[in-house]
Amino acid sequence: MLVLGIETSCDETAVGIVEDQFTLRANVIASQVELHAPYGGVVPEVAARAHLELLLPTIDHALVQAGAGLSDIDAIAVTAGPGLVGALLVGVSGAKGLALAQDVPLLGVNHLRAHIEAAQLEYGELTPPLIALVVSGGHTSIVVMDEDGLCRQLGGTIDDAAGEAFDKIARFIGLGYPGGPEIDKLARQGDPTAFAFPRAMMQGDGYDMSLSGLKTAVIRQLRKMEAAGEEPNLADIAASFQDAIVDVQLDKTLRACAAEGLDQVVLAGGVAANSRLRERFAEQTEINGQRLIVPSIPLCTDNGAMVAASGANLLAAGSFVGLDLAVDPNLPLAGAAASFG
Ligand code: KG4
Ligand code: ZN
């Protein structure tokens, strides 16, 4: 069974093709980074227009990569939320047209759940219960995926998402967009102990977190140094900032594992591409004897393969949607498997 997945929730027009739920056949991304870079962030109208232009060529490209024709596709999966409404509408409309024309089932995918399920393309079937840390440009949450496959949110950011914090600090110190990979690169030359930036809400046993105070502390530090005529070492700033974010994610996620009695952790979303986050989780889960599931970098940042994988799971469960599928810009992760179909 071949499932074609379409992802247009933000600034990547992406199409993936997955065979029999677990085998990646194609993963093509038409990035819009250059279009948005001059604005230092994603411009929703620009994203929607670009999706419109890029969607059909990206589908064609994915079919070529998979060595398949449209008539070989058994179902069409598409991200229905969360994301930018105009951007989502382009993908969902395209998917409906394809499903109708090819007379195949349509599958409505939750973007956040798809980030988690991307891992099945490299690790095989996920075996819940497990803890997942979902960290992206718009979302930061710690969830339990229970034995029934449904997700239950334990906590999340109460202000900035982790990726948003990376992007904002990168912009402030004059790095390009998206900022996460730039900070990651710069931080490798810096000392993570150079500045003691705050780790908010580390006390207590809750799983919520706050990242905007950290951002303010970094900006305040830079302004203070500027006023004193000191030249900041930006690599040290980047490394210290990055470690503060990683510390919070690591502490809260592994504490959730202990409290829930679970020993499998999935890292998901664009920020899971961060080299320091990956390294620290690898070290600590090894010490704790936990199983770390972390997809390779192209499957962490937004991609179509994860949508195809998640769609293939819905297909296997018989969870189809009709041509009246609506987009939901605020679609929650909790209960996602049951939210469509
Ligand atoms: O999951 P994603 O591709 O899109 C959303 O669903 O939001 O995540 C994008 C976010 C951006 O904020 C980007 O800066 C961040 O992931 N990101 C990173 C890295 N690569 C991407 N953050 C830190 N380190 C990275 N290496
Ligand atoms: Zn994403």
Image (cartoon, rainbow, N blue to C red):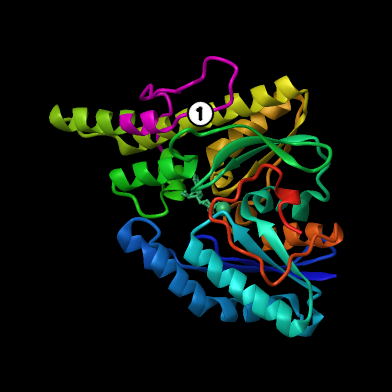
Report the residue at 41% width, 40% height from top. Answer: 165
Please provide the residue range marked out in magenta. 189-216
Image quarter for residue 301? bottom right
Q: Which residue is drawn at the image coordinates 65% and 80% (left, top)? A: 97
- Number of numbered discs present? 1
**Quadrant housing residue 229:** top left
Is residue 119 something one can see in this rendering?
Answer: no
Query: Which residue lies under the disc numbered 1?
Result: 209
Q: Residue furthest front?
A: 324
Specify the quadrant that holds the C terminus. bottom right
State yes or no: residue 193 in magenta.
yes
Q: Is residue 279 left or right of residue 191?
A: right
Q: Is residue 175 visible?
A: yes
The residue lying toward the viewer, choosing from 71 and 278, is 71
Establish if 134 lies above or below 327: above
Q: Position of residue 153 (x, y in %)?
A: 65, 35
Above-or-below relation of 193 to 98: above
Instruction: Tell whether 73 sits left or right of 14.
Output: right
Quarter occupied by residue 35 = bottom left
